[in-house]
Image (tube, rainbow, N blue to C red):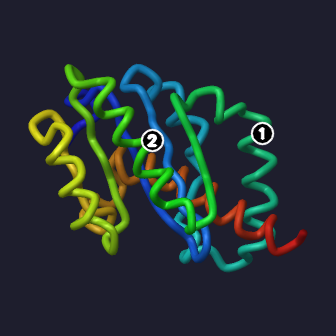
Amino acid sequence: MGAKQFDYYIFIDYSEEFIGYIIIERGKIQEIMPKISKLRHYKEVNDKNTYLKALKKSINKNCLHNSLYSCKIKKMISTLEIYADIADFIFSNKNSKIFISLDDNQVSNFERMVRDIDGEKVRIIREGKLKRGSVEQRLSLIIDNLLNIERKDEVRK
């Protein structure tokens, strides 16, 4: 895949009752990578609460959100809104090459929607097919962890 092939990288994921996405511009990848060096997949963490608490502090300290082109997290009931945002983005950036990583369970319907908008410059890949340790897989950990932080914060409310 390689971090130089695409103009934008979109990562869509869900965690229990939340769905979200992040959009990253190719030029921001080098800025983001040092900020996410300590990210791990949530399932691999032993002390999940401590990890998420430390991660939330790190994200705020490093101003990670400022490096993202766009980020949105909503309840699962708003899946259509999330997909509409992505569709609008693809439509607005027809001349850009776009990489989309999507949770394995949501690929087929989403692929049909993207094909109707602009299937030629958009590459959709299942999250489970991302090469472990690749730039794309490391970037996908951002939304994975943001969703888990949101889910844990919702439980505490």
Q: Secondary structure at mark 2?
A: helix
Q: Position of residue 69 (x, y in %)?
A: 51, 28
Q: Position of residue 5 (x, y in %)?
A: 20, 30
Could you say which is closer to the camera, residue 92 or residue 64?
Answer: 92
Q: Residue furthest right?
A: 157
Mark 2: give few (<14), some (14-19) or many (20+) Cα within 10 Å. Answer: some
Instruction: Kindly identify the residue that appears in the image at 55 percent across and 60 percent down.
Output: 78
Is 123 placed above or below 47 here?
above
Q: Secondary structure at mark 1?
A: helix
- Left or right: 136 in relation to 28: left
Mark 1: give few (<14), some (14-19) or many (20+) Cα within 10 Å. Answer: few
Callout 1, which amino acid?
Asn
Could you say which is closer to the camera, residue 80 or residue 53?
Answer: 80
Callout 2, which amino acid?
Asp
Pointer 1 or 2: first along the chain = 1
Q: Would you say the residues marked 1 and 2 are in contact, meaning their CB atoms lie under 8 Å apart?
A: no
Position of the C terminus, as image quadrant, is bottom right
Position of the N terminus, as image quadrant, is top left
For residue 85, which numbered disc appears in the image? 2
For residue 60, which numbered disc appears in the image? 1
- Left or right: 33 in relation to 133: right
Is 69 placed above or below 101 here?
above
Identify the image quadrant of residue 39.
bottom right
Alpha carbons under labels 1 and 2: distance apart: 25 Å
Q: Position of residue 94 (x, y in %)?
A: 22, 25
Instruction: Kindly identify the residue that appears in the image at 63 percent across and 55 percent down.
Output: 146
- Left or right: 23 in relation to 116: right
Identify the image quadrant of residue 90.
top left
Instruction: Kindly identify the residue that appears in the image at 76 percent across and 51 percent down.
Output: 56
